[in-house]
Amino acid sequence: MEIPVFTVDAFTNLPFKGNPAAVCLLDNELQDELYQNIAAEMNLSETAFVTKLKSTDTFCSGARFGLRWFTPINEIALCGHATLASAAVLFYKKENTNPVVVFETLSGELRVRQHGESLVMDFPLNKPEVQDLNKYKNLLKAVVGDLPVQDVYYCKTTMKLLVRLADTCDRSALTSLNPVVETLLKCEDSGKIKSVVVTIKGAPTSQPGYDFFSRNFAPWHGIPEDPVTGSSHTVLSAYWSERLGKKKMLAYQCSKRGGELQLELRDDGRVDIAGRAVVLLQGTLKL
């Protein structure tokens, strides 16, 4: 069996920036064990598997595909950067002729369209709920140390804990965070939290005018830090929209690789997440 495989840097227009994902194009479904083995072999934060839904479909002309995402250790229910990467392969490498492609996923139908040099993903909006800081005292200490925390929110749908640092913290405070994976796993073993997203208010009056910054630590998925995370912005956009009074926002995830996301909350209760992508490598898995 031969499987076309690509690596794509998502949420960036530069190679070696943004978040890398592997994308495999499948004519038919595989056994779950094989999905996981391939993802472990690729050893990126996510490997996406795009599957034809009909035998008559092609990746060049089909409008609907199955899509699953695997980290090196498990399957996940929603992944933004690997969805962006999958659409980039279809539009840029397969020259898909449709204005919109639809992915059938564990999170329902996800639509992606081209808009200029960007790809726009139609994603669910996931509103988090306020939490008592004391409930997560040890975990917060492990993630942000002695930095002042303003808010703690939890999103049950995505299993993400959102931690907002006080406005006295600047971007350097966020970029200097270096939590120890083993400590995080020890502090949180309930299974209810799969990643911790730390965020601060941005500086929209300074160019390019980011409304907020974030980082995402997800060792519970086998990912010490996810460089640029679309799914966390389904939560962040809901949180920051209420506090900033804005439906359109520009965000930057300031990991070492870094990546930019354009966000727009829609009237139907969903969010458009736009970003660019670079297809870096193309090859064949021979199994």
Image (tube, helix red, strand yellow):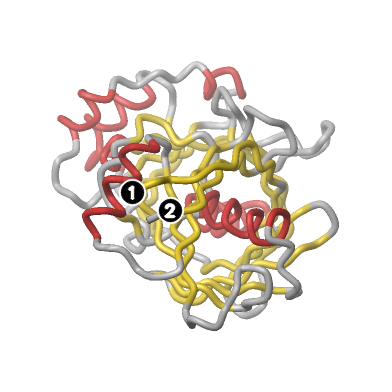
Q: Quadrant of residue 110?
A: bottom right
* Label annotation for residue 287: 1
**Please, what is the three-letter code of the amino acid marked with disc 1?**
Leu
**Please, what is the three-letter code of the amino acid marked with disc 2?**
Glu
Q: Tell me how far mark 2 sits from mark 1, CA to CA.
A: 6 Å
Q: Nearer the viewer, residue 202 or 119?
A: 119
Q: Quadrant of residue 16?
A: top right
Q: Quadrant of residue 141?
A: top left
**Residue 198 located left or right of residue 14:** left
Earlier sequence position, callout 2 versus callout 1: 2
Residue at 42% from the left image edge and 37% from the top image edge: 44
Task: Say above or below: 226 vs 47.
Answer: above
Mark 2 neighbour class, 10 Å CA radius: few under 14, some 14 to 19, many 20 or more:
few
Mark 1 neighbour class, 10 Å CA radius: few under 14, some 14 to 19, many 20 or more:
few
Residue at 37% from the left image edge and 18% from the top image edge: 146
* Label annotation for residue 278: none
Q: Position of residue 237 (x, y in %)?
A: 58, 55
**Residue 139 located left or right of residue 249:** left
Q: Position of residue 151 (x, y in %)?
A: 43, 43
Asked if marks 2 and 1 touch (Cβ < 8 Å), the reply is yes
Q: Is disc 1 placed on a helix, strand or loop?
A: loop
Q: Nearer the viewer, residue 141 or 98?
A: 98
Q: Position of residue 119 (x, y in %)?
A: 71, 58
Q: Position of residue 256 (x, y in %)?
A: 56, 22
Q: Is disc 2 placed on a helix, strand or loop?
A: strand
Q: Nearer the viewer, residue 66 or 260?
A: 66
Determine which residue is flagged by label 2: 2
**Residue 141 located left or right of residue 88:** left
